[in-house]
Amino acid sequence: MYERASKVRRASVNALGGISAGILGGEAAGLVNLETNFVCGGQVAGIANVVGGPVVGGQVAGIANVSAGLTGAQAGLVNVDAGELEGAQVGLVELAAEGRGVQAGLVNGARADLSGAQVGLVNVTGGAVHGVQVGVVNYADDSDLSVGVVSIVRHGRTHIDTWVSDWKLLAAGVKHGGKHFYNVYGAGVRAGLGDGSTRAALVLGIGGHFDLSEHVWLDADGLGHLLLPTGDQKTMVNVGTARVALGLRLARQLSIFGGPTYNVAVARSREDADLSAFGTHALRDESGLSIRGWPGAVIGAEGL
């Protein structure tokens, strides 16, 4: 066993498994490949490839790939790189210490900084993401862009916004993200037009932030609103809004903002979709589905 582990092989084919110091070429095993020092080439295994040092090339396994530094790619159910990543990990669970590349799995994790992308249901980085995270839940110390239902940037920007729209929506929300991109999580109330009814609304959105000067900034975002049923209005209404808002910083933690919007409402009837007091135009009107759009405006204040 010791003699085998001290050898560097150019090629190795193992019925069940094999162990050596390193591979300069290719290796295949029915179950497990184990290298104590390095791999420069490729490994294929039915269960696992485990390398105690760096891998330059590729690892493909039915269950797990392990390396201590990766320049290339890992493809398996679980991929672990204990060193620096320069390449890609593709599978269900991807773990790396740090590096540059892409992690694409259900769960992606990096212990320190990652330059590149994480794409999955859950993305976690213990350092900064110089690139993008796309998932349902994202977490990073800092991030250029995190896109998800819930994105937490530990050292990012967090503000409380309140705003009113032309279609009588009064809302408040948390705007949180990195230096230039953010998510919006909010709720509001939409007053009725002449009938005294009100409808509660849930708000989710994503946008970009740009500082034009010390006291002036610009936000461009898209918001999705869900108007909940109430009283005689038994159906929900979806409203999408694109906003461009110019902000004026009055104090270190207080700004006012305003700008134009364009809104699209989707409902079962024209009556439910016709939300603006100034009129809407039909994008689609038929039995059981009404889609109506209108230009509008928003004004608000931002604190914290």
Image (spheres, rainbow, N blue to C red):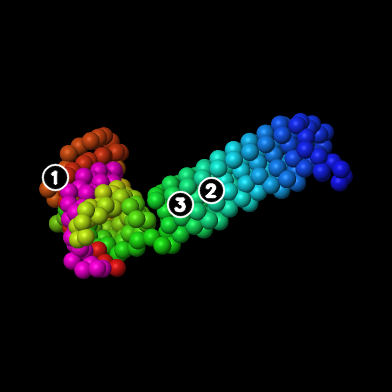
Percent position (x, y) of residue 32?
Answer: 77, 41
Q: CA distance from mark 2 to mark 1?
A: 53 Å
Lower sequence index among marks 2 and 1: 2
Q: Which mark is residue 129?
A: 3
Secondary structure of residue under mark 1: loop
* CB contact under 8 Å: marks 2 and 3: no
Task: Please give the residue where the numbered disc 1 appears in the rendered image.
Answer: 279
Q: Amino acid at mark 2?
A: Gly
- Could you say which disc has been placed on residue 237 in the image? none
Identity of the residue drawn at 27% across and 62% down: 161
Query: Can the viewer see residue 236 in this picture?
Result: no
Real-space CA distance between mark 2 and mark 3, rounded to the nearest whole angstrom:
10 Å
Give yes or no for residue 14 being in the magenta stretch: no
Q: Nearer the viewer, mark 2 or mark 3?
A: 2
The answer to whether the residue labelled 1 contacts the one labelled 3, judged by CB atoms less than 8 Å apart, is: no
Amino acid type, mark 1: Gly
The segment highlighted magenta reads 239-267
Q: CB atoms at circles 2 and 1 under 8 Å apart? A: no
**How many tags in the picture?**
3
- Check the image and report above or below for 75 versus 178: above
The picture places residue 35, in percent across and down from the top left corner, at 75, 43
Q: Please tell me in which quadrant of the rendered image residue 73 appears.
A: top right
The residue lying toward the viewer, choosing from 25 and 211, is 25
